[in-house]
Image (tube, rainbow, N blue to C red):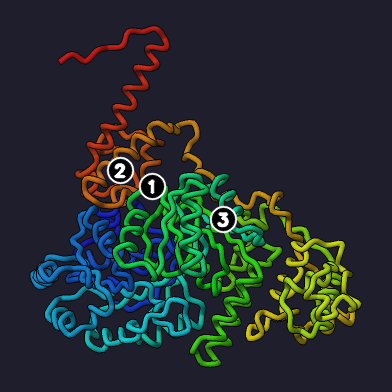
C-alpha cells in the first residue's frame, strides 16, 4: 500500500473520517478482494472505488451505464486533483486517441467507460496491456433481468473476471433486495466476494403519499409552500404527460421546468440535463428515462405524479433527492387509474408469465406502501431486509398519525355493487350506482333497480374512490385489466360480505385540509442559527456560480452546499482554517481558498463598517 487511505481521504477529498462501511470496503479492495457493496444513494459509494484506485498501483476502471453524466463525474475528480478521463461514444476520434494514449502512458488514476465500449475488442486489448488497479461496476443492479433498470450489456461483464482474474472487482448499487443480490453475484461471477451492506435508510428524506385529487393543483401547492425556487425532479408515467406537465408548470406556476424523455432528440435531452445540473432552481419533469447516476447533490425534492412500478423503482428514484445530506422531500400523489394503467402495461408486455406474475407482486407491494397507516420508512427499509427500531418521525404518517375507521359496511356496499352489476364495470360507474345518480347508462343497464342503487348517497365521490382504492390495494377487490379496468371480487371478498371479517381503512383528508406531511422539505436549518448570515451565504453561492461558469462545470463540482454552509458557520480567515472545512482537499484549497476567503473577508469588513456607522464612529478609509 503506497499511500495511506486516511491520508488520501483528507488530502484529496477533504474529509476527516469514513462513514458506515466505507473503510472496510476500501481496505478489502486495496487488499485485492472482490466485493458487492450495497450503500444508499448519497452514502459515499464512489469513494469505495476511487480511493483504492488512487492507492493501488495501476488504473481503476469504472463501468457506468449512463455516458451522459461521465463528464461531470470526471470533472469532479479533476477538481480534486485526481487524474480521470472517460471513454464513450460522445468523444471525437481525436479525443479517444488522447485518452487511450493517457492509459498506455500510465497518466490516469481512473477511467470511466460505458459497458458497450469496455467490452469492445479495442478497449479490452488496450486494458490487457495496462496495469490495472481494479474494476468498479457501478449501478450493478442493471445486471438483474428481473430488475427495474436492466441493461443487457451488463450480462457480459462476467468476462472481466475471466480475462483479468487477478484484478479485484467491486460491484456497487443502492437498490437490491435479497434475490437481486444473489443474481448480481451469480451473473458477475463474484463467487468469493464479500457482501457489504451499509443499510438503506436516508433519514434526511421525508416521505409522503397523498391521494390524487387534481394532481397539478396538488403539485403546485406543494412547490409553492415547500420548494419555491428549489431544484427537483417530477416523475410522470408517459411522455405526453411529461410534456404537458412541464409546459403547465412554466406557464401557470412560474416554475423553471424542463421536460426529459426518450421521445426528445438527443441534443434537447442533453441541453435540458445540462441546465438542470448547472443552473439553480431548475425542475426536470421526466419519465424514468431520467435520473440514474445523477450526481447533483442539491435536489431538494422528488415528486411522483404517477405510481412507480415497484418499491425498488420508488426507492431508486426518490434517492436522487438530498444527496448532500440536507433535508429533502419524496412526495407522491396516486390514484386507482394508474394502477389500472400499470397492470395493463404488464399484461400487454412480451414478458413470460413468470415475469408478469413477479411484476404484479411488486406493484401490489407498492400499493400496500401507499396505503400504510404506519411509519413509511420502517416498511420501506423492511422491504430491503433492513430495520428501524422506532418510527422515523419524518414521514407523513409519523408527523400526523393517520385516523382509521371501520369501513366494513362501506366495503360490503362496494363489493355487492360490483357483484350485482356483473363485475364488468369500472370504479367511476360503480360510484355513480352507489350514489344513485340518474344517468342514461345506468337506466340502460337497469342498474337503478338494484338493491345497491343509491345506498351510498351519504358519501361523496372522493370518499368512495378512497374505499375502492384501499380495497384494491388490500387485495379485497381486483382490477380486470383485459376488461378496461372492471372491478372484480377476489377470494378475500367473501368473508367480508358474509360479515366474518372486519375492514379498517385510513381516513383520507380533503385536499384543502391536507396536513403538513414532512419536516424534510423545509429550508435547511443553518448549522447554528446564532452564526447564520444569509447575505454571506448568497455571496458565497454567487462566487461559486461565477467560478463554475468560467470553467463550464456545475456549481456543485466546485463545492457542495454543505461546504458553503460550513464557511458561513465557521468564517475561516486563513488557509489553515479553510483546509479544515469538509470537502476541502489540497487541490481545492490551492484553487479556491483565496477566492472564498476574500468573499468572507469582504463580507466581514462590510459588516464592521455598517456597525461603526450605526454607532457613529468614523469608518477608516483605505488610501492607496
Mark 3 vs mark 1: in front: 1
Q: Which residue is mark 3?
A: 206
Instruction: Give yes or no for contact between labels 2 and 3 (Cβ–Cβ under 8 Å).
Output: no
Q: Which residue is mark 1?
A: 280
Question: Few, some or many C-alpha atoms within 10 Å of disc 3 (few <14, some 14-19, many ≥20)?
Answer: many
Q: Which residue is mark 2?
A: 545
Instruction: Give yes or no for contact between labels 1 and 2 (Cβ–Cβ under 8 Å).
Output: yes
> Residue 277, relative to residue 104: is it above or below?
above
Name the quadrant containing residue 386.
bottom right
Relative side of 398 to 22, left or right: right
Res. 199 in view: no
Decide which of tag 2 and tag 3 comes sooner along the chain. 3
Which residue is at 62% across, 74% downward? Answer: 339
Estimate the spatial distance between the alpha carbons at disc 1 and disc 2, rounded to whole Å. Answer: 9 Å
Relative side of 360 to 78, left or right: right
Label 3 residue SS: strand
Relative side of 548 to 531, left or right: left
Mark 2 vs mark 3: in front: 2
> Residue 142, relative to residue 26: is it above or below?
below
Name the quadrant containing residue 183.
bottom left
Q: Position of residue 493 (x, y in %)?
A: 80, 82
Q: Which mark is residue 71?
A: none
Amino acid at each position: 500500500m503506497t499511500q495511506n487511505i486516511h491520508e488520501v481521504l483528507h488530502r484529496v477529498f477533504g474529509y476527516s473520517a469514513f462513514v458506515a462501511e466505507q473503510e472496510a470496503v476500501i481496505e478489502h479492495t486495496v487488499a485485492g478482494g472482490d466485493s458487492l457493496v450495497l450503500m444508499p444513494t448519497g452514502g459515499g459509494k464512489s469513494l469505495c472505488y476511487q480511493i483504492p484506485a488512487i492507492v493501488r498501483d495501476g488504473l481503476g476502471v469504472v463501468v457506468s451505464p449512463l455516458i451522459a453524466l461521465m463528464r461531470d463525474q470526471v470533472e469532479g475528480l479533476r477538481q480534486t486533483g485526481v487524474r480521470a478521463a472517460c471513454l464513450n461514444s460522445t468523444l471525437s476520434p481525436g479525443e479517444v486517441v488522447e485518452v487511450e494514449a493517457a492509459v498506455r502512458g500510465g497518466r490516469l488514476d481512473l477511467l470511466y467507460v460505458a459497458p458497450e465500449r469496455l467490452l469492445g475488442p479495442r478497449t479490452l486489448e488496450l486494458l490487457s496491456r495496462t496495469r490495472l488497479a481494479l474494476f468498479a461496476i457501478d449501478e450493478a443492479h442493471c445486471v438483474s433481468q428481473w430488475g427495474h433498470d436492466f441493461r443487457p450489456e451488463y450480462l457480459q461483464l462476467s468476462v472481466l473476471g475471466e480475462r483479468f482474474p487477478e484484478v479485484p472487482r467491486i460491484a456497487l448499487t443502492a437498490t437490491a433486495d435479497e434475490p437481486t443480490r444473489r443474481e448480481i453475484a451469480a451473473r458477475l461471477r463474484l463467487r468469493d466476494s464479500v457482501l457489504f451492506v451499509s443499510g438503506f435508510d436516508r433519514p434526511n428524506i421525508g416521505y409522503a403519499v397523498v391521494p390524487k385529487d387534481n394532481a397539478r393543483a396538488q403539485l403546485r401547492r406543494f412547490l409553492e409552500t415547500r420548494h419555491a425556487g428549489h431544484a427537483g425532479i417530477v416523475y410522470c408515467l408517459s411522455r405526453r404527460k411529461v410534456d404537458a406537465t412541464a409546459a403547465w408548470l412554466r406557464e401557470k406556476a412560474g416554475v423553471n421546468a424542463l421536460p426529459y424523455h426518450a421521445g426528445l432528440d438527443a441534443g434537447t435531452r442533453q441541453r435540458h440535463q445540462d441546465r438542470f445540473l448547472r443552473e439553480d432552481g431548475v425542475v426536470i419533469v421526466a419519465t424514468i428515462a431520467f435520473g440514474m447516476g445523477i450526481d447533483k447533490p442539491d435536489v431538494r425534492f422528488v415528486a411522483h405524479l404517477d405510481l412507480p412500478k415497484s418499491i425498488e423503482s420508488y426507492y431508486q428514484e426518490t434517492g436522487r433527492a438530498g444527496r448532500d445530506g440536507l433535508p429533502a422531500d419524496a412526495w407522491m400523489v396516486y390514484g386507482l387509474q394508474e394502477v389500472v394503467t400499470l397492470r395493463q402495461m404488464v399484461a400487454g408486455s412480451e414478458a413470460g408469465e413468470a415475469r408478469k406474475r413477479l411484476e404484479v407482486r411488486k406493484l401490489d407491494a407498492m400499493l400496500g406502501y401507499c396505503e400504510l397507516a404506519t411509519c413509511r420508512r420502517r416498511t420501506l427499509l423492511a422491504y430491503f431486509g433492513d430495520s428501524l427500531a422506532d418510527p422515523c418521525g419524518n414521514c407523513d404518517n409519523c408527523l400526523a398519525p393517520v385516523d382509521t375507521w371501520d369501513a366494513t359496511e362501506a366495503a360490503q356496499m362496494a363489493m355487492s355493487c360490483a357483484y350485482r352489476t356483473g363485475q364488468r364495470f369500472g370504479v367511476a360507474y360503480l360510484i355513480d350506482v352507489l350514489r344513485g345518480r340518474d344517468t342514461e347508462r345506468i337506466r340502460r343497464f337497469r342498474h337503478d333497480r338494484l338493491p345497491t342503487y343509491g345506498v351510498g348517497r351519504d358519501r361523496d365521490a372522493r370518499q368512495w374512490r378512497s374505499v375502492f382504492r384501499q380495497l384494491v390495494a388490500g387485495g379485497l377487490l381486483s382490477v380486470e385489466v383485459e376488461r378496461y379496468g372492471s372491478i372484480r371480487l377476489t377470494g378475500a371478498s367473501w368473508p367480508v360480505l358474509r360479515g366474518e371479517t372486519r375492514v379498517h381503512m385510513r381516513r383520507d383528508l380533503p385536499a384543502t385540509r391536507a396536513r403538513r406531511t414532512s419536516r424534510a422539505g423545509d429550508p435547511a436549518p443553518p448549522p447554528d442559527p446564532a452564526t447564520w448570515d444569509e447575505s454571506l451565504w448568497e455571496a458565497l453561492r454567487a462566487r461559486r456560480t461565477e467560478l463554475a461558469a468560467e470553467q463550464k462545470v456545475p456549481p456543485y463540482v466546485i463545492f457542495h452546499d454543505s461546504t458553503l454552509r460550513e464557511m458561513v458557520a465557521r468564517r475561516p480567515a486563513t488557509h489553515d482554517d479553510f483546509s479544515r472545512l469538509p470537502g476541502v482537499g489540497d487541490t481545492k484549497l490551492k484553487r479556491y481558498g483565496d477566492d472564498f476567503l476574500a468573499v468572507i473577508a469582504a463580507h466581514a469588513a462590510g459588516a464592521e463598517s455598517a456597525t461603526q456607522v450605526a454607532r457613529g464612529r468614523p469608518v477608516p478609509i483605505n488610501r492607496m
